[in-house]
Image: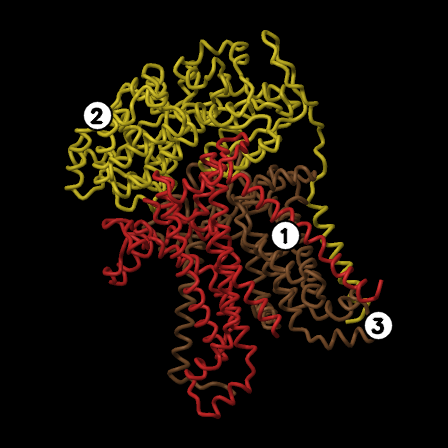
């Protein structure tokens, strides 16, 4: 049934558009700043004025750097972000799925205690554990390595991925499991044959959430990865703004470049995000 | 071993890796932080000399600048968390309800509201710093310039440079709250939208047939059904705001008179700029305790519920 | 979902995860690291060993003139030691707060770089030397006859316990007042030499609707400390000012009170939105003529030039009011950590840092003056030349917010006191807090 345009509908659209405008304000600033020249972008009273021309040099320098001036570009680090984020996302999602499955369907002794204990890990302030973290990783032989940072993101991703999957699997009717048991399936094959096939919406939510957080994460990356060749794009971006005199047009251009993958994910997977939440991971 | 017992063993083994990792990387480190908080480690070289609760005393009831700053921090966090959660929940609910009305172009609107979550805090902090920079009478900047152009000069004010306060509430926090809410309202919108969509149409039709107005239907039926979502969102938002650092640090820093200072910033500065490791650890423990106070009751409550169900 | 499809999915996920992670982990570096030299006492009067392998240089010079200058110095090093690979380990830029965090975690984990950037003076001494993490570099100074080339004031800042602890690459000056010449001309003003003249000029400017002093402290309390230290110097004079940092001058004394009172008065002449501007955005106010003056270190000159201005043409410079004859210095330097993986390479690097060639490559680009007295004047612009003259003739005073005068703990405590003072202008509370900071730092009684 198509809706007719009564005043109420118009009001709804107006509100949505108003909010969209508000939401897009920072995007406008980001975009227009990235296209301005250095002197233009320094003049904050002209923050809202559009750029005088399409000055694309900032994007070029942000991406390639200026080797003669010792300025590293973002290009090499984009791959590093991918090398970091993809494995970390996949591994933490899988772990979350397994944990969620066990904790929602298999009540062994202490399961009720383990889940909140695991969840609490989400709440620690990350700056406070930097020192023991670096020392522990070093003791494990992972100091300053990519796998060390991947491990860190996997570990600190366990609480949220477990939470999402546990709530998601809690919605799966136990009859399905009972039916599989009657067929003689054990705990592992039930996961394999029953739960995993159903998990797609859960995975979507978790993957979107983890990918975004790990991609944008800065503190661990800057502390744990010393060598500039290993650092992800968030650190490289920060380095662009590193001088005493910050070239904001270039930094904004870099920020846009760095945000492209996560933006694409939200643009294309946004609806699946909602569907995934809808499929049960929503409820507390 | 019976089949059931074997299965429980396998279940346990499946979560064992996570348990071990969390035990080390969370609880082990919390233990370390607590130990440091009870020491007098000041400077690069570790010093685990026991001083009991001295660091806590210094932060909470001391006489000097440290305690003054920390008191301001605690109030700032309280108000920031409160208003930020309210803003995200109210705005998220509103937008979700609007989006749920079978809108043409829902995908576009939804993407616009969701995507701020895709951008890192460090970047948005700078943008919002510019947006809310007040400028001066002769050279207005940011929002003030816009307001002037729209003829709304009465609405101009100092934003985050304003050092005044209403009681213990520093008004400079308002632009920071706006920035944070902008970033995370998409999350609550998505949650509420999913929640609204999960309410069966039959329920709504039945209510309408019974003669209920739209508003009454929302108030009596829909909102109560969304309560679990609200609770869940509050926990996630709450812990983000209690720990918040990146956004505030890049947007306003501590602010003149510490008007926008939060424990996360204080902890970072005192540890890595001042080399006061014990003091930083003490701040972390207090942050953890405040989060625990909020989160633990929720966890207990939701477990009781589950046991009952 | 059929069993085969599921296996395929799991298998491909695993392969992707491992494969991507494996791609990301870099291959081992082609050159092997030089064997670690045991940390025996350094030999004196011996020619430095020829270094091989690679050196890792840690700094926060990631962009701008700093990065460019560093690259130029790397070129000098590479010309001398072409066999050695330079690993430019830079972190996050700015004032170095993240870099210091990273460095601290590394040093504590026993993983020092071969050399790292550090402010000369108490930042180095009270952070790293006291923790026994550094080797003295006195022998490098002696081997290269640098004790004749560096001014005694600088050597004093670099020293503690009879040894020298770092090699300064540059000198920056803190107590400079920059002004817009056109604005001064239009209002019939000349550059103020005393605080009274400053306030008088301020009144004239306020009446003309121009902000007298531009301030931008969104970057942190260091900016406020920066202005305050010029006021302290104006009231105390160089000798008593130096005494603030070793406990011989009383922080509760009347001069400090007067300096604070003047700071409160200065705040009336400052732009109201100072906490929304960074120091360079404040400098931009001077460029635009919205403000007349700003007190900032001589990296401000780098800013003015980057927007196309010329020293002595559009902008002028004088020592901060009341501080003529004194030079508040800060210096970026490099040290020698204990257990540096490539000690010979590190020593070679330090030799380049302290050499005329290295400093003359770095400083003109960076916008600072060499720490050596024999720099090639022709490479530096008119302001930097005047700075070199002042540096050679003035009284040298160490800077507070830039790591020369006091330990980092002291600086942060002073910064906290400043943050509160700028808001409430409570002189008594600020003075008490500053005095307490000295006590807490273990210097005052």
Q: Identify the residue at image location x=29%, y=49%.
A: B163
The type of colouring in the image is by chain
| Label disc, if present, on residue C193 of the rendered structure | 2
Do callouts 3 and 1 point to residues on the same chain?
yes
Query: Distance between the Cα atoms at labels 2 and 3?
Result: 94 Å
User: The C terminus of chain C lies in which quarter of the figure?
Assistant: top left
Residue C63 shows in the view: no
- For this rendering, which residue is in front, C208 or C381? C208
Q: Chain of mark 2?
A: C
Give the percent coordinates (x, y) of residue A85: 63, 52
Q: Indicate the colour of chain A.
A: brown
Q: Are marks 2 and 3 on the same chain?
A: no
Q: Which residue is mark 3?
A: A184
Q: Which chain is yellow in the rendering?
A: C
Colour of chain B as rendered: red
Neighbours of disc 1 within 10 Å: few (<14), some (14-19), many (20+)? many
In the image, B296 versus B134, the foreground residue is B296
Residue C179 found in image quarter:
top left
How many marks can you see? 3
Q: Under tag 2, what secondary structure?
A: loop
Q: Position of residue C443 (x, y in %)?
A: 39, 24
| Residue B174 locus on image (x, y percent) | 35, 57
Task: Tell me which residue sits at (62%, 54%) in the image.
Answer: A157
User: Marks 2 and 1: which is nearer the front?
Assistant: 1
Q: State if disc 1 and disc 2 touch (CB < 8 Å).
A: no
| Disc 2 crowd, CA 10 A, few/some/many (<14, 14-19, 20+) | some
Gap in angstroms between the C-alphas marked 2 and 1: 58 Å
The residue mark sitting in front, 2 or 3, is 3
User: Which quarter shows the N terminus of chain C?
Assistant: bottom right
């Amino acid at each position: 049934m198509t809706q007719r345009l009564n005043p109420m509908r118009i009001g709804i659209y107006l509100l949505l558009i108003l909010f969209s405008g508000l939401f897009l304000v920072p995007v406008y600033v980001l975009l227009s700043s990235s296209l301005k020249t250095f002197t233009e972008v320094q003049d904050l009273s002209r923050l809202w004025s559009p750029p005088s021309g399409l000055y694309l040099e900032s994007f070029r320098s942000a991406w390639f750097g200026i080797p003669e001036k010792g300025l590293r570009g973002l290009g090499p680090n984009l791959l590093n972000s991918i090398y970091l984020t993809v494995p970390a996302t996949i591994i933490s999602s899988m772990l979350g799925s397994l944990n969620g499955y066990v904790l929602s369907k298999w009540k062994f002794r202490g399961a009720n205690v383990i889940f909140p204990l695991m969840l609490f890990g989400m709440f620690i302030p990350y700056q406070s554990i930097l020192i023991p973290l670096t020392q522990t990783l070093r003791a494990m032989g992972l100091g300053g390595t990519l796998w060390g940072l991947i491990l860190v993101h996997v570990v600190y991703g366990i609480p949220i991925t477990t939470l999402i999957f546990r709530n998601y699997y809690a919605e799966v009717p136990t009859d399905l499991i009972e039916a599989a048991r009657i067929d003689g399936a054990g705990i592992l094959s039930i996961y394999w044959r029953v739960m995993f096939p159903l998990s797609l919406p859960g995975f979507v939510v978790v993957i979107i959430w983890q990918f975004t957080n790990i991609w944008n994460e800065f503190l661990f990356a800057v502390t744990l990865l010393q060598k500039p060749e290993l650092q992800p794009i968030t650190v490289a971006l920060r380095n662009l703004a590193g001088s005493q005199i910050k070239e904001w047009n270039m930094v904004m251009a870099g920020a846009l470049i760095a945000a492209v993958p996560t933006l694409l994910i939200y643009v294309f997977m946004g609806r699946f995000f909602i569907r995934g939440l809808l499929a049960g991971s929503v409820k507390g | 071993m019976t089949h059931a017992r074997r299965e429980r063993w396998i279940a346990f083994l499946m979560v064992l890796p996570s348990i071990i990792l969390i035990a080390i990387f969370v609880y082990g480190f919390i233990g370390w932080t607590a130990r440091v908080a009870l020491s007098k480690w000041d400077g690069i070289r570790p010093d685990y000399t026991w001083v009991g609760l001295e660091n806590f005393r210094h932060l909470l009831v001391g006489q000097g600048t440290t305690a003054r700053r920390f008191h301001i921090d605690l109030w700032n966090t309280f108000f920031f968390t409160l208003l930020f959660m309210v803003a995200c929940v109210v705005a998220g609910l509103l937008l979700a309800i609007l989006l749920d009305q079978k809108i043409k172009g829902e995908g576009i609107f939804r993407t616009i509201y969701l995507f701020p979550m895709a951008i890192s805090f460090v970047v948005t902090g700078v943008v919002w710093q510019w947006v809310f920079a007040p400028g001066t009478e002769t050279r207005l900047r940011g929002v003030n310039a816009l307001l002037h152009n729209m003829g709304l000069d009465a609405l101009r004010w100092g934003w985050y440079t304003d050092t005044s306060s209403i009681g213990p509430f520093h008004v400079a926090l308002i632009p920071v709250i706006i920035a944070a809410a902008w970033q995370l309202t998409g999350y609550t919108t998505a949650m509420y939208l999913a929640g609204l969509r999960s309410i069966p149409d039959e329920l709504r039709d039945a209510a309408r047939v019974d003669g209920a107005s739209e508003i009454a239907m929302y108030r009596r039926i829909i909102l109560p059904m969304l309560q679990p979502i609200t609770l869940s969102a509050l926990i996630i938002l709450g812990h983000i705001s209690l720990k918040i650092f990146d956004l505030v640090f890049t947007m306003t820093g501590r602010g003149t008179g510490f008007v926008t200072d939060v424990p996360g910033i204080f902890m970072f500065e005192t540890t890595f700029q001042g080399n006061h490791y014990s003091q930083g650890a003490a701040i972390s423990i207090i942050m953890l305790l405040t989060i625990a106070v909020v989160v633990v009751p929720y966890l207990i409550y939701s477990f009781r519920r589950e046991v009952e169900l | 979902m059929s069993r085969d499809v599921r296996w395929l999915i799991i298998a491909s996920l695993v392969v992707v995860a491992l494969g991507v992670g494996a791609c990301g982990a870099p291959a081992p570096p082609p050159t092997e690291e030089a064997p670690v030299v045991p940390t025996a006492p350094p030999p004196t009067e011996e020619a430095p060993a020829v270094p091989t392998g690679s050196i890792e240089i840690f700094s926060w010079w990631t962009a701008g003139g700093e990065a460019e200058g560093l690259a130029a110095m790397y070129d000098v090093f590479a010309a001398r030691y072409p066999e050695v690979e330079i690993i430019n380990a830079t972190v996050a830029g700015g004032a170095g707060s993240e870099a210091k965090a990273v460095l601290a975690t590394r040093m504590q984990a026993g993983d020092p770089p071969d050399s790292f950037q550090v402010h000369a003076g108490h930042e180095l001494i009270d952070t790293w030397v006291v923790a026994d993490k550094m080797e003295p570099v006195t022998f490098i100074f002696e081997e290269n006859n640098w004790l004749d080339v560096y001014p005694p004031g600088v050597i004093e800042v670099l020293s503690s316990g009879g040894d020298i602890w770092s090699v300064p690459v540059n000198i920056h000056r803190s107590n400079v007042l920059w002004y817009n010449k056109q604005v001064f001309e239009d209002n019939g003003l000349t550059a103020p030499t005393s605080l009274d003249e400053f306030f008088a000029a301020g009144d004239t400017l306020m009446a003309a609707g121009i902000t007298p002093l531009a301030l931008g402290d969104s970057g942190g309390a260091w900016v406020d400390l920066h202005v305050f230290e010029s006021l302290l110097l104006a009231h105390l004079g160089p000798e008593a000012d130096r005494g603030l940092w070793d406990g011989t001058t009383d922080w509760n004394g009347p001069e400090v009170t007067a300096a604070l009172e003047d700071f409160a008065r200065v705040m009336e002449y400052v732009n109201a939105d100072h906490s929304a501007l960074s120091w360079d955005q404040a400098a931009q106010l001077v460029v635009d003529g919205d403000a007349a003056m700003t007190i900032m270190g001589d990296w401000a000159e780098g800013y003015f030039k980057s927007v196309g201005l010329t020293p002595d043409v559009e902008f002028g410079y004088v020592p901060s009011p009341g501080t003529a004859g004194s030079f508040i210095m800060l210096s970026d330097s490099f040290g020698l950590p204990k257990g540096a993986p490539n000690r010979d390479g590190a020593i070679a690097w330090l030799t380049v840092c302290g050499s005329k060639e290295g400093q003359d490559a770095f400083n003109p680009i960076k916008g600072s003056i060499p720490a050596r007295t024999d720099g090639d004047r022709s490479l530096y612009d008119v302001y930097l030349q005047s700075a070199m003259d002042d540096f050679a003739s003035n009284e040298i005073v160490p800077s507070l917010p830039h790591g020369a005068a006091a330990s980092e703990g002291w600086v942060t405590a002073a910064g906290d006191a400043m943050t509160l003072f700028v808001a409430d202008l409570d002189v008594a509370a600020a003075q008490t807090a500053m005095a307490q900071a000295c006590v807490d730092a273990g210097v005052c009684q």
